[in-house]
Image (spheres, grey):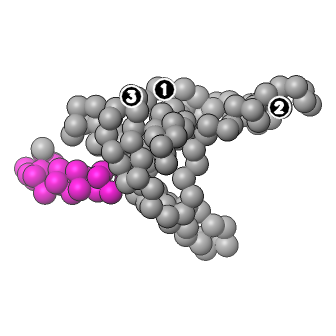
């Protein structure tokens, strides 16, 4: 194991934000940056985004996977970005709940309240034509 490299990673983690269970009001300070997470032990690379947010008056870095569903944090943020034309300077409310799964593991779920309203509005204004959703 490369201990010097591992210690360097620890020093970088001080500005990382991982929202815990509860309600968090944050301000997005800049547009998201596409990046990737490299798990050197497993040899995998996972696409993710890096978002700079203001949490309790402190700038933090929030990393998240590039989800593929509307329910993912990434999907919710993309809906906000589409509706607003940008993400920077947007205030959002992140609600984190802890859910116990059937296998006994605990998983956090994330909901961005502003995205819920935007997604609901887009579903209401969509028209169904010949079985296809248009809108």
Q: How many marks?
A: 3
Camera-nearest label, 1 or 2: 2
Residue 57 is marked as: none
Q: Secondary structure at mark 3?
A: loop
Residue most toward the front?
57
Query: For the point 80% across and 35% down, which residue is it?
Result: 41
Mark 3 highlights which residue? Answer: 31
10 in relation to 117, above or below: above
96 in relation to 12, above or below: below
Q: Earlier in the sequence, mark 1 or mark 2?
A: 2
Range of the magenta residues? 112-134
Please name whichever residue, 135 or 87, is drawn nearer the observer in this view of the structure.
Answer: 87
Q: Secondary structure at mark 2?
A: helix
> Where, quadrant-wise, is the C terminus in this rendering?
top left
Direction from residue 93 to residue 131 in the image, left or right? left
Q: Residues within 10 Å of mark 3 (few under 14, many from 20)?
A: some
Query: For the point 58% across and 28% down, which residue is it?
Result: 36
Please name whichever residue, 51 or 102, is drawn nearer the observer in this view of the structure.
Answer: 51
From the top left corner, tell me how far across and down residue 105 is, in percent: 66, 67
Image-quadrant location for residue 2:
top right
Q: CA distance from mark 1 to mark 2?
A: 23 Å
Query: For the point 52% across and 40% down, which residue is it?
Result: 58
From the top left corner, tell me how far across and down residue 83 is, in percent: 21, 40
User: Is there a contact, CB below 8 Å, between mark 2 and mark 3?
Assistant: no
Camera-nearest label, 3 or 1: 3
Q: CA distance from mark 3 to mark 1?
A: 10 Å
Q: CA distance from mark 2 to mark 3?
A: 29 Å
Mark 1 highlights which residue? Answer: 34
Whether residue 71 is visible to the viewer of this picture, yes or no, is no
Q: Earlier in the sequence, mark 2 or mark 3?
A: 2
> Where, quadrant-wise, is the N terminus in this rendering?
top right
């Amino acid at each position: 194991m490369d201990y010097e490299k591992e210690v360097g990673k620890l020093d970088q983690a001080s500005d990382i934000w991982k929202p815990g269970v509860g309600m968090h009001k944050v301000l997005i300070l800049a547009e998201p940056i596409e990046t990737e997470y490299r798990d050197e032990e497993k040899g995998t690379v996972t696409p993710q985004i890096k978002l700079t947010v203001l949490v309790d008056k402190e700038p933090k870095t929030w990393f998240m996977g590039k989800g593929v569903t509307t329910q993912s944090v990434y999907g919710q943020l993309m809906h906000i970005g589409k509706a607003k034309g940008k993400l920077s300077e947007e205030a959002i409310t992140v609600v984190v709940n802890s859910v116990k799964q059937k296998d006994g593991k605990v998983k956090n779920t994330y909901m961005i309240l502003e995205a819920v309203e935007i997604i609901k509005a887009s579903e209401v204004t969509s028209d169904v034509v010949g079985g296809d959703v248009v809108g």
